Image (cartoon, helix red, strand yellow):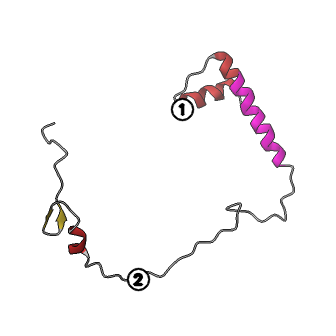
Amino acid sequence: MVTKNEVDKIALLSRLEFKEEEKEIITQKFNSVIETMKKLDELDTQNVEPLTHVLPMKNIFREDEKVDSSLREEILKNAPKSSEKLFKVPKVINQNE
């Protein structure tokens, strides 16, 4: 069972402030959630396989393939300005600030 002291600790850790009436409501709601979760303990899960996801999923991997990346000149043709093998862009950071 959650107490008001524990709600105070949770609020402190969460950097939240509550009025006394709100703390009372939050305490009741926490305890309601805990009671609901306790009902799950009553279920017989002996023959239930644990799930990692509700839908059957499997990752599809592809083989890594080496690809020719010598398209640099073609890519740099699209740049308004370039220098050697790089894009040239306007300076956006003032180092005096």
Q: Tell me if label 1 and label 2 are in contact, CB under 8 Å.
A: no
Q: Which residues are magenta?
A: 25-41
Give the image location of residue 16, x and y in percent.
55, 26
Mark 1 and mark 2: span between their CA atoms? 49 Å
Looking at the picture, which amino acid does disc 1 mark? Answer: Leu
* Rendered residue at 36%/83% (across/down): 66
The secondary structure type at the circle numbered 2 is: loop
Quarter-of-image position of residue 59: bottom right
Looking at the picture, which amino acid does disc 2 mark? Answer: Glu
Residue 2 lies in magenta, yes or no?
no
Could you tell which of marks 1 and 2 lies nearer the N-terminus?
1
Q: Is residue 18 visible?
A: yes
* Most common SS among magenta residues: helix
The residue identified by callout 1 is 13
Give the image location of residue 12, x and y in percent.
54, 28
Mark number for residue 81? none
The secondary structure type at the circle numbered 1 is: helix
Give the image location of residue 2, x and y in percent.
72, 31
The residue identified by callout 2 is 65
* Rendered residue at 25%/79% (across/down): 70
Q: Nearer the viewer, residue 20 or 88?
A: 88
Give the image location of residue 50, x and y in percent.
74, 63
30 lies left or right of 68: right
Q: Nearer the viewer, residue 36 or 7?
A: 36
The number of callouts visible is 2
* Rendered residue at 70%/68% (across/down): 56
